[in-house]
């Protein structure tokens, strides 16, 4: 059936007349190999087509997802939708994206963290150009291309595996904001779980004397301080001693996620020793030195930090390679970004003295965000746009919304005898198919891409 762009008067007709009735059949996609109105986390896609059909969707480097097709109103300028398509392709590891308003058709290809335009034509010329379009995104050619590329990747990985094992690929990420209550701990523990489920070896370090991450990963199994089994071996001991308390000895296995992760716990006594540690010249570098000793053991280290400008926050930012700044985007959290920026500047001054590269900021992560529809549609975009303009920080693509499942999984407990013991689990283990879990999967993908471990 020929396509006439003049018959498309709205977005719905672009979808039905151009994509469903013309393009998908011409490109060899049968109804069982494409889906309409697909939701993946906070992302909503018009059309998702598969070269090879695999359910459930796989959101990693081996993803079979092949083409995203986005239809817009004929009056819309496609330039205004390119950044959103970039987010879709890079977040979901989809190779190609087709963007159209009926009057114009564009095809973009994902290249690592960006996309490039590889085809463009007017809607009235689509029949004349269908062979060009087919050579890029028809189902059979994509299927064959994926098969060849998979074989090439397997050969390349085999050749380089021994060399890559010798390289120090451990990445250290601090999660920091000097305002409390912005979702820092929730981000650390669930991001750790998402990274672990992607096959990464994960170590979490709690550097906050409030020990929220220690609680959140289920390491506090006592109900009375008399039975406190953490006070004798925690992050404080790592920082105090150069010769004793290596990370492998202090880190504990946490089963709050499956597979389990390693956690260096904190303790409330940490706050009593800050002045003592300040007197130790090497205390600021102790954590970095001890992490070097286990650089072959972990792929990603996540450091939870205190909401302050104190020594422990300094240690975290001196040690880390990368920084995530979680923020609920409320006024005080936003104003606090000025302090964060000044703090990073001072940290980078010290890093320069010790000939360590500048701290790389992955971005401000919108966290604990209201799910109210009006807020998401109207207020949230304005607040996100304000961050780079006012404070000079990039904003991460991922958004973590304030969802009930995040609270429920953190509040789980066990009854042991007559004692109630905290037994939190990650949201990815509590409800793996939930929207909250998918949001952390997307965050993990974004982080892995940005730190070069995707």
Image (cartoon, helix red, strand yellow):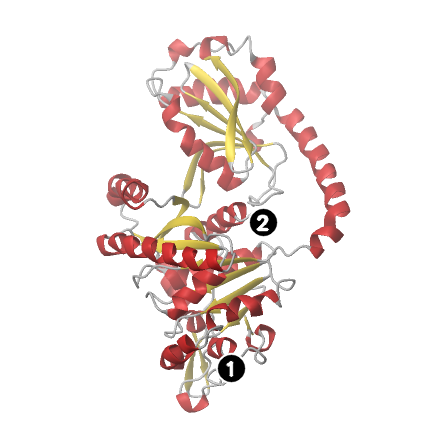
Residue 114: image location, x then y, percent:
50, 34
**112 lies above or below 192:** above
Residue 128: image location, x then y, percent:
55, 8
Residue pushed farthest front?
353
Residue 210: image location, x then y, percent:
36, 74
The residue depicted at 55 percent of the width and 39 percent of the height is 93
Between residues 78 and 415, which one lies in front from this camera angle? 78
The residue depicted at 42 percent of the width and 16 percent of the height is 102
Between residues 16 and 138, which one lies in front from this camera angle? 138
Q: Which residue is mark 1?
A: 233
> In terms of sequence position, does the residue under pointer 1 or pointer 2 come before the other?
1
Q: Is residue 438 left or right of residue 339?
A: right
The residue depicted at 41 percent of the width and 32 percent of the height is 83
Residue 167: image location, x then y, percent:
67, 54
Residue 24: mark in rendering: none
Q: Is residue 140 left or right of residue 84?
A: right
The residue depicted at 28 percent of the width and 51 percent of the height is 329
Choose top left, top right, bottom left or bottom right for residue 402: bottom left
**397 lies above or below 205:** above
Q: Secondary structure at mark 1?
A: loop
**432 lies above or below 22:** below
Q: Let me know if residue 139 appears in the view.
A: yes
Give me the C-alpha separation between circle 1 and circle 2: 31 Å
Residue pushed farthest left?
331
Q: Let me know if residue 261 appears in the view.
A: no
Q: Is residue 231 left or right of residue 260?
A: left
Q: Secondary structure at mark 2?
A: loop
**80 lies above or below 262:** above
Q: Which residue is mark 2?
A: 453
Give the crowd class for mark 2: few <14, some 14-19, many >=20 residues within 10 Å. Answer: some
């Amino acid at each position: 059936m020929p396509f006439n762009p003049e018959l498309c008067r709205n977005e719905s007709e672009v979808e039905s007349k151009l994509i469903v009735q013309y393009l998908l059949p011409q490109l060899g996609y049968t109804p069982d190999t494409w889906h309409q109105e697909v939701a993946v986390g906070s992302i909503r896609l018009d059309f998702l087509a598969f070269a090879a059909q695999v359910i459930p969707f796989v959101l990693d480097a081996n993803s079979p997802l092949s083409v995203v097709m986005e239809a817009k109103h004929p009056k819309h300028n496609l330039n205004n939708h390119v950044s959103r398509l970039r987010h879709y392709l890079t977040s979901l590891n989809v190779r190609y994206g087709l963007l159209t308003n009926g009057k114009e058709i564009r095809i973009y290809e994902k290249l690592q963290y960006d996309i490039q335009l590889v085809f463009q034509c007017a809607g009235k010329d689509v029949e004349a150009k269908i062979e060009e379009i087919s050579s890029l995104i028809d189902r059979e050619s994509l299927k064959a291309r994926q098969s060849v590329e998979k074989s090439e990747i397997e050969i390349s990985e085999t050749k380089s595996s021994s060399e890559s094992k010798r390289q120090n690929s451990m990445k250290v990420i601090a999660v920091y904001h000097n305002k409390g209550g912005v979702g820092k701990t929730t981000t650390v523990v669930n991001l750790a779980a998402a990274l672990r489920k992607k096959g990464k070896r994960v170590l979490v370090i709690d550097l906050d004397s409030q020990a929220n991450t220690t609680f959140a990963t289920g390491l506090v199994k006592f109900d009375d301080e008399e039975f406190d089994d953490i006070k004798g071996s925690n992050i404080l001991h790592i920082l105090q001693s150069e010769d004793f308390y290596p990370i492998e000895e202090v880190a504990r296995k946490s089963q709050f996620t499956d597979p389990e992760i390693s956690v260096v716990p904190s303790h409330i006594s940490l706050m009593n020793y800050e002045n003592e540690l300040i007197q130790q010249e090497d205390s600021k570098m102790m954590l970095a030195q001890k992490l070097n000793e286990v650089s072959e053991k972990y792929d990603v280290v996540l450091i939870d930090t205190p909401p302050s400008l104190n020594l422990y926050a300094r240690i975290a930012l001196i040690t880390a390679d990368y920084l995530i700044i979680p923020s609920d985007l409320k006024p005080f959290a936003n104003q606090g970004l000025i302090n964060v920026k000044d703090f990073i500047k001072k940290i980078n001054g010290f890093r320069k003295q010790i000939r360590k590269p500048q701290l790389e900021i992955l971005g401000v992560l919108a966290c604990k965000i209201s799910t109210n529809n009006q807020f998401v549609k109207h207020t949230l975009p304005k607040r996100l746009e304000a961050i780079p303009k006012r404070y000079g920080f990039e904003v991460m693509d991922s958004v973590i919304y304030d969802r009930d499942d995040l609270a429920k999984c953190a509040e789980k407990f066990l009854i042991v005898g007559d004692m109630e013991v905290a037994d939190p689990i990650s949201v990815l283990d509590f409800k793996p198919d939930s929207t909250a879990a998918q949001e952390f999967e997307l965050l993990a993908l974004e982080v892995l891409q940005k730190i070069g471990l995707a």
